[in-house]
Each structure stands twice: as structure tokens, then as C-alpha cells.
């Protein structure tokens, strides 16, 4: 049993300098766990509610004092002194105390901070590393390490909209270890820095997730520059290193059309464009190619990409079990982008994970564009046998804290990295 003695939370700042929560859970036996929650910018409409103060005079309304107070008062009052069999029971209580469908009473940020802090404290009480705690929660043995997909170029909401699509990521498909994947990516990233200096006359100015963000002349230019950077680093595009893209198309979808730069495409036109990109460039994973409301066209996109690139749902699914069930039934995707703060508790994220797995899907465990130095995500991706992990670029400490944790877990466990399908 795990008896909560005290929950206490603090407002801290994330990688964009915006407030978020860091919460500590102390158990009666003296074991403690502390965890911080991330925050998205290109959020899906179906995400659980992140509670912000809305006081325009402080952090432009983004303060988290109410959410902190909800942990220190509401949740602490309700949970201190109570004994739980484990994570699932705690998370069920958190959901019940909030009592809304989208966690808007207490705030998904407040709730998740407690869910995660409890996980760390419980792992300490059980004397197990956090990744093993997550594996035990899932009831599945540790099998593998996730393959990093690493941000190279940024656009969309993470880079002031200078290019319509949001992320171009490097997938080191031939790497056999995390160590090798990161070393390969470093070379590609440095080649891209040099290419951008030559081509755009720009220093390595980076976007929210550390991706390079020059004024690309459209998405194709992003892919061409990525391929050129892979080559310049001495790798064969499509064999050693491939690309993953997050189109994040919900954010340029209006009145049933996609406003892609100067062009306006309907759904059929957008699917044509996406399959054309996958045919011309070594793109092996395509996230949010269509918008979160464009349910009717996702099955066609998935059918067209099958065997060539993963059809990844982020805004479409929002790590929400109901939306995942709908997508499975409609055959709308084959990969879940798993972001725990989209749903708000570990137990519900696990339910999402299990639904995706039982449909035979792959899982990409993902960070948010607003992150902290906390590294629980790396443990989660290992514990739940994620196929891919998406953390951002190979710069900035809030990103590197996760990669560095993966390196430590790799050294400790000697687990193999998941193979890329067909590699
Ligand atoms: C995404 C994420 C991470 P955000 O769209 O996949 O890149 O962005 O956290 O802003 O939603
Ligand atoms: Mg996304």
C-alpha cells in the first residue's frame, strides 16, 4: 500500500519561460517523488484542460497559481492520509475529485503533477527505477528502448509560422543503439547548421524545441535541406537516416480546406500532396497529415501511406481512449502519438496505450513543445516499450535531459533499441 502523507506544489517555469507545476508527493513511509508537467503550444481541441490563472497582469494570464493551490489545498485535503493499492486507484480518485470530463475543475496540469509525483514516490518505496515501475504498471516486461526521432527543422506554431508545417525530424533508422542514434543525429544537425549559414545567411537560431528555423521557401525546401544535411553528414538518406514529419495540419485547416502557404487544398488535394512528398522524400512517419476534425479522410490517407510511412495521430487522437477507439474502428491511423498531459493521468494514458497496442498500432511517446528539465518521459517510453520517442532537437537542456536519461537507461539495462520496420 502507498499512503499519501502530503502533496505540495510549486509554480516553476518551462522552457518557454511560462509557468507550470512542480509537485512533490510524500508517502507515509518517508518516500518522496517530485515531478514537473509539460505544456503544448500546438494543442489539439480535445485535450484535457490546462488550468491557467487568466490574470492578464501576471505572465499574460498564463500563471498557474490556481492549479498549484488546487494541489496544495483541494487534492492534499482529499488525499492526505489515504492509502492506495497503486497508481490506477490513485488516478481514479483524482478523476473522481475533479468530476468533469476534461479535468477543468482542478486542472489537468494539477492532476497530472500529482499522478506523476506519486509514480516517482511509489517507485522509491518499491526500490525500483522509474522505468521498471512503469513496466510493472503495464504488467509487461521491459523489452526494448524507443528509437529517437529528433527535431531538425521547425515551422508552424513552434517557429512563428514562417513555414506551414511544424516539424521535420531525423529518424536514424540504421542506428542500433541510443548512443549511435544520437551521435548520427549530431552530425546531421551540425551539417544542417552549416547548410543554413550558407543558404540563408543565418546563425543557428532555433525554435521552441531547438529545431533550426530559417525562412524556408515552403515544405519541399525543408525536406530538400534535410536530405542535403543527411548527405553532407555522410549518410545515405532513406537507408541510414530517414525523415519523420509533423504536418500539424489542424492549425492551417479552415472551413474544410488546408491553407498550405499560398495554396488552398481540399482534403483530396492534401492527401495527394502528402503522398507526393512521401514518394519524393525519405519520409517514413507522417503525423497529423490531416486535421483533427477531418475524420472522413483519415482512412484514405492511411491506406495511401500503408507500407511506406506511419500514419501518426496527435491532435486527431489527443491520447484520448474514446478518440482512439473511434480511429481504430475507422481504420484512420496506425500509430498513436502518446502525450500524457493531453489526457491528464498515467492510468488513462495507459488505457490509450493499450487500445493502440491491441489494434496492432505502433506508439510514439512524445514530449511537448514547452518542457522542463524533468526526465520522466524517458522512463515512461522505456517502461511502456514505446517504438519511437519524440523529444525535440539535440540541443537545449529540457530536451537533452530526456536523451541523457535514455543514455543512462541504455547503459544500465543494455536493452536493445526497437528496430525500424523493414530496416
Ligand atoms: C506536437 C508537439 C510536440 P506541442 O505537435 O507534436 O512537437 O507540439 O507540444 O506544441 O503540441
Ligand atoms: Mg504533433
Image: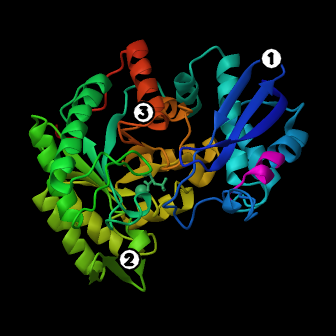
Tell me how many marks there are.
Answer: 3
How many residues crowd around disc 2 within 10 Å: few (fewer than 14), some, or many (20 or more)? few
Compared to residue 363, the image places residue 264 above or below, namely: below
Q: Give the range drawn in magenta.
A: 62-69
Q: Does the magenta stretch include residue 255?
A: no
Residue 35 visible in the current orientation: yes
Q: Which of marks 2 and 1 is in front?
A: 1
Quadrant including the N terminus: top right
* Residue behind mark 3: 385
Could you give the CA–CA distance between mark 3 and mark 1, rounded to whole angstroms? 30 Å
**SS assignment for the magenta stretch, majority:** helix
Q: Is mark 1 on a helix, strand or loop?
A: loop
Could you give the CA–CA distance between mark 2 and mark 1, rounded to whole angstroms? 52 Å
Instruction: Name the residue at 42% across, 82% down.
Output: 254
Residue 22 falls left or right of residue 322: right
Sequence-wise first label, 3 or 2: 2
Amino acid at each position: 500500500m502507498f499512503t499519501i502523507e502530503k502533496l505540495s506544489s510549486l509554480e516553476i517555469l518551462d522552457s518557454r519561460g511560462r509557468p507550470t507545476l512542480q509537485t512533490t508527493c510524500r508517502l507515509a513511509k518517508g518516500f518522496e517523488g517530485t515531478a514537473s508537467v509539460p505544456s503544448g503550444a500546438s494543442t489539439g481541441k480535445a485535450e484535457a484542460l490546462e488550468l491557467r490563472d487568466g490574470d492578464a497582469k501576471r505572465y499574460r494570464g498564463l500563471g498557474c497559481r490556481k492549479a498549484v493551490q488546487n494541489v496544495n489545498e483541494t487534492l492534499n485535503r482529499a488525499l492526505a492520509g489515504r492509502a492506495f493499492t497503486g497508481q490506477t486507484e490513485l488516478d481514479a480518485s483524482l478523476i473522481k475529485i475533479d468530476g468533469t470530463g476534461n479535468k477543468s475543475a482542478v486542472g489537468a496540469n494539477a492532476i497530472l503533477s500529482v499522478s506523476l509525483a506519486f509514480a516517482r514516490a511509489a517507485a522509491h518505496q518499491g526500490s525500483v527505477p522509474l522505468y521498471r515501475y512503469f513496466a510493472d504498471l503495464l504488467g509487461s516486461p521491459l523489452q526494448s528502448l524507443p528509437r529517437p526521432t529528433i527535431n531538425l527543422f521547425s515551422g508552424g506554431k513552434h517557429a512563428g509560422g514562417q513555414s506551414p508545417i511544424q516539424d521535420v525530424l531525423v529518424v536514424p533508422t540504421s542506428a542500433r543503439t541510443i548512443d549511435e542514434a544520437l551521435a548520427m543525429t549530431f552530425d546531421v544537425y551540425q551539417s544542417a547548421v552549416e547548410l543554413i549559414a550558407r543558404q540563408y545567411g543565418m546563425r543557428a537560431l532555433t525554435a521552441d524545441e531547438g529545431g533550426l528555423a530559417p525562412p524556408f521557401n515552403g515544405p519541399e525546401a525543408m525536406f530538400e535541406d534535410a536530405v542535403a544535411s543527411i548527405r553532407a553528414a555522410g549518410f545515405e538518406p532513406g537507408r541510414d537516416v530517414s525523415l519523420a514529419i509533423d504536418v500539424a495540419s489542424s492549425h492551417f485547416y479552415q472551413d474544410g480546406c488546408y491553407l498550405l502557404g499560398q495554396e488552398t487544398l481540399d482534403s483530396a488535394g492534401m492527401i495527394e500532396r502528402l503522398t507526393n512528398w512521401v514518394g519524393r522524400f525519405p519520409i517514413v512517419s507522417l503525423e497529423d497529415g490531416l486535421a483533427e476534425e477531418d475524420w472522413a479522410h483519415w482512412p484514405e490517407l492511411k491506406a495511401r501511406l500503408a507500407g511506406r510511412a506511419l500514419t501518426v495521430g496527435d491532435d486527431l487522437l489527443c491520447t484520448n481512449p474514446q478518440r482512439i477507439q473511434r480511429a481504430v474502428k475507422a481504420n484512420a491511423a496506425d500509430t498513436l502519438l502518446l502525450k500524457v498531459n493531453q489526457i491528464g493521468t498515467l492510468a488513462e494514458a495507459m488505457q490509450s496505450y493499450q487500445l493502440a497496442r491491441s489494434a496492432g498500432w505502433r506508439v510514439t511517446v512524445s514530449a511537448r513543445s514547452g518542457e522542463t528539465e524533468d526526465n520522466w518521459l524517458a522512463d515512461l517510453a522505456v517502461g511502456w516499450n514505446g517504438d519511437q520517442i519524440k523529444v525535440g532537437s539535440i540541443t537545449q537542456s529540457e530536451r537533452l535531459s530526456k536523451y541523457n536519461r535514455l543514455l543512462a537507461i541504455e547503459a544500465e539495462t543494455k536493452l536493445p533499441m526497437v528496430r525500424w520496420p523493414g530496416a
